[in-house]
Amino acid sequence: MADKPKPLLIKRYASRRLYNTETSDYVTLEDIAGFIRDGREVQIVDLKSGDDLTRQYLLQIIAEHESRGESVLPVEVLNDLVRSYMSGDVSVVPQFLQTSFDMLRDGQARVMENMSSMNPMAKMPGLEVMQAQQQAFMKAMTGGWGGSTAQDAAPAAKADAPDQGEDLDAIKKQLAELQDKLSKLK
């Protein structure tokens, strides 16, 4: 497995200005959001104290986009996030979100690999599997944890992609376990 590249280091000065150490210029939150959209990891540190401020600034970027009407997170998900922070118990929500986004990234990477190595007019192998994963992810993220599970979302995809069935079964099992844990927290 290849080493991850070092994150882009952004330093916050006492004036609260953000300084890109690679290009030696000041950047805005929108610039940082652009770096992330382009696939760069960022690390934001306070110049004086050395404190890592990355999480704080990433949350600020999300809040600004949400306040402009660019809603990505349903209210139910935001409520669950607040509950997970306020409950005091160990929450499975962060692990669930990380696993879900890892699955989404992996599925997108597979589609891009398939697209670059095939005729665009041909049926894209693995598309059904990715669609099933995305449907299960979206169902879980929009409050569908109590109803049908990710196992309901993928039978057709499994039949069309038997070589990926074992991976899909493992993902479905993990998602079902996380859904079960979340339902017990409510």
Image (spheres, rainbow, N blue to C red):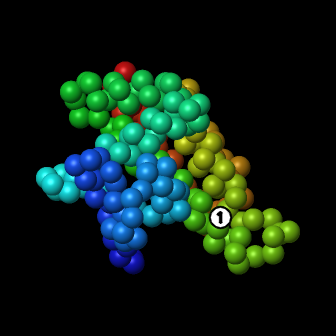
Task: Give the image quarter of residue 129.
Answer: bottom right
Q: Residue at 59% of width from left, 36% of height from top?
A: 70
- Residue located 34% across and 54% down the image: 18
In which quadrant of the rendered image does the N terminus lie? bottom left
Give the residue displayed 80% in from the left and 65% down from the top. 123
Q: Quadrant of the C terminus?
A: top left
* Up-down relation of residue 74 to residue 132 (above or below): above
Q: Give the SS element for disc 1.
A: helix
- The three-letter amino acid code for the residue at tag 1 is Val
Q: Quadrant of residue 184?
A: top left
**74 relative to 129, above or below:** above
Residue situated in front as seen by the camera: 105 or 170: 105
Q: Is residue 5 left or right of residue 74?
A: left
Q: Position of residue 71 (x, y in %)?
A: 57, 33
The reply to whether residue 14 is visible in this rendering is: yes
At 33% from the left and 38% from the top, the residue drawn is 92
- Residue 73, visible in the rendered structure: no
Outermost front residue: 15
Which residue matches tag 1? 111
x and y, in percent, of residue 110 in the image: 60, 66
| Image spot of residue 162 (x, y percent) | 65, 63
